Image: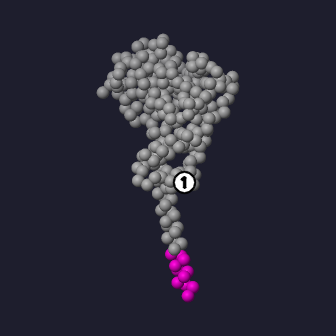
Amino acid sequence: MLEPILVVIIVLTAIAVSTAVLSYRRFAAVRARLVTYLGQAAPEMTVRALTAVGFVATILGSEVTVDLATLARRRPRGLAEPHWFDQVVDGIRARVPVPEVPPYPLVADRLMPLLKPSHYVAIFAGYPSPLRLVWRPLVGDLAVTYVIAGTHQHTLVTAGMVQVWTVSLETLHGQAVENFRKQTAHLLEEIGGPRARYEHLDGSDATRILVADLIVPPEIADPVIAIPEETVLLIAPADEHATLAAEAAARYAASTRPVSPLMFRPSAAGPILLEASPAP
């Protein structure tokens, strides 16, 4: 009599295990799609680790643990996945704490500018005002944001920080650019001087268009500059403009961290937009 019961128990257990495995695979697939979506819709979030029920993301220097399994169970019936992902992103942003602000004298020498497309800055309009980025327009669709440089990661400078520091945007910008000039001069010593191509050196290659007087090789008398990606800055003579523009447009289109597909000419007052659209 016990043998048929044992068989039933084994079958039911196998079914339960199979169902659980299938359910977790579906959950893992949803999580993978959401992580990919975050890279496009929420580039300010970095997924640091996966957990059994979701993931841990770093946002503005803070870690936020996301229980995606619970959120999935609460997903409104019939809500399309992209719209649900938008709700999840909004919920994550609402949970980001306002970080403690370090004293200005302790971070002043670590402030750096970081060039971003203006649509990146617009993302932070969805955050509480203390967490919105401090920035200034540069040229075209470019914005200068600011970070506190760290050993393993940068912390974005927000409105709440500047309010605590009681420093003006002009003071912040001046300090950041001064620090950046020193860092760039040191980098040039390490790599043997200015070059025509800066690629994947330290993550701030495109931002060096702000200090073009340091980085343009002396042999290029009439330079044009391309900054298709955060980690790429390319320089060429003006008569090679078309070739450089085509490369910049292609690299911009393929990049996960694009900056601009356009071309610029350096000047004492800062970069000048060379044209309104990339070369065909």
Q: How many marks?
A: 1
Residue 175 image-quadrant placement: top right
Residue 181 image-quadrant placement: top right
Quadrant of image for the C terminus: top left
- Comparing 231 with 134, the one in front is 134
- Comparing 262 with 57, the one in front is 57
- Specify whether residue 4 is painted magenta: yes
Q: How far across and down, in percent of the image, does residue 116 sit?
A: 48, 28
Is disc 1 surrounded by few (<14), some (14 to 19) or many (20+) residues within 10 Å? few
Q: Is residue 207 visible?
A: no
Q: Is residue 91 visible?
A: yes
Most prominent secondary structure in the magenta stretch?
A: helix
Above or below 208: residue 23: below
Q: How far across and down, in percent of the image, does residue 114 sit?
A: 53, 26
* Residue position for label 1: 70
* Element assignment for label 1: helix
Residue at the (58%, 27%) spot, across then down = 159
The magenta segment is 1-11
Q: How far across and down, in percent of the image, does residue 209 sit?
A: 48, 21
Residue at the (54%, 43%) spot, across then down = 92
Residue at the (61%, 28%) spot, across then down = 160
